[in-house]
Image (cartoon, helix red, strand yellow):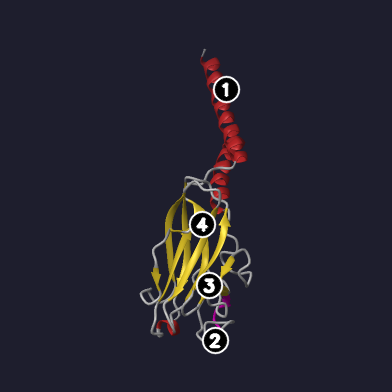
């Protein structure tokens, strides 16, 4: 493979990898051990706010899920965000750098601990963008047992800013609870960086010039 051909292939690879892997959500895996990067709303239950708990421990609140050992999800590490209020509407949210009128995918892992399922009341969880729901409303009691990966797509409509929120509501005393992890937002059709476009254009121009030279040399030889 010629050097110019290699540059073109490398530029295309960089185009896909750079744009696709850019982290849009801050601390979406909660491995900082807290909710830094997120704005926390405890609603009317400040004694049981959304928190971060460690996996595989039997600690009580606020260091665990009331004695239940929560396993790590596939691809998860040591920590997840935990919602456990019996009655309050709570959320964690953050502003995202999105492009208006662009399609994005939202993904996260969700888990409903068994001790919460044993409580008499259900709980719900859904995602929203600027206050508008962009996911279905998940029920803790109806959720498949174990970790479940949820994924959806949405369009970032024209707005001065974009605020992603994960919204929880406990159904009564006592209610189910949720653990979430690996929150991510990605561009469905990533756009290349300007520098990558420049590399690609330069590479294609070089390939075109080489093809022209080869054609000219062939014409001269057969003349």
- In this picture, is 27 found above or below 213? below
Residue where numbered disc 4 is placed: 185
- In this picture, is 15 found above or below 73? above
Q: CA distance from mark 1 to mark 4?
A: 46 Å
* Among numbered discs 1 and 4, the one appearing first in the sequence: 4
Q: CA distance from mark 2 to mark 4?
A: 31 Å
Q: Residue at x 58, y 82 (%)?
A: 62
* Among numbered discs 3 and 1, the one appearing first in the sequence: 3
**Range of residues picked out in magenta:** 52-57
Q: Quadrant of residue 209?
A: top right
Label 3 Cα neighbours within 10 Å, binned few <14 / some 14-19 / many ≥20: some
- In this picture, is 180 found above or below 165? below
Residue where numbered disc 1 is placed: 213
Toward the viewer: 208 or 96? 96
- Badge number at residue 96: none
Residue where numbered disc 2 is placed: 58
Secondary structure beneath label 3:
loop
Secondary structure beneath label 4:
strand
């Amino acid at each position: 493979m010629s050097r110019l051909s290699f540059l073109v292939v490398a530029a295309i690879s960089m185009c896909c990898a750079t744009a696709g892997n850019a982290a849009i959500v801050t601390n979406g895996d909660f491995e900082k051990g807290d909710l830094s990067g997120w704005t926390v709303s405890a609603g009317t239950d400040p004694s049981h706010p959304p928190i971060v708990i460690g996996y595989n421990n039997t600690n009580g609140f606020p260091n665990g899920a009331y004695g239940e050992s929560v396993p790590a999800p596939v691809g998860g590490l040591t920590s997840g965000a935990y919602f456990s209020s019996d009655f309050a509407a709570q959320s964690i949210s953050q502003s995202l750098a999105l492009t208006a009128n662009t399609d994005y995918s939202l993904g996260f892992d969700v888990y409903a601990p068994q001790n919460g399922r044993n409580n008499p009341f259900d709980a719900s969880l859904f995602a929203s963008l600027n206050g508008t729901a962009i996911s279905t409303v998940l029920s803790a009691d109806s959720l498949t047992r174990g970790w479940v990966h949820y994924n959806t797509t949405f369009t970032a409509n024209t707005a001065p800013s974009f605020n992603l929120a994960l919204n929880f509501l406990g159904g009564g005393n006592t209610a189910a609870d949720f653990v979430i992890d690996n929150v991510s937002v990605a561009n469905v059709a990533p756009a290349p960086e300007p520098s990558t476009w420049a590399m690609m254009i330069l590479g294609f121009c070089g390939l075109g010039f080489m093809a022209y030279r080869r054609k000219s040399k062939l014409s001269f030889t057969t003349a």
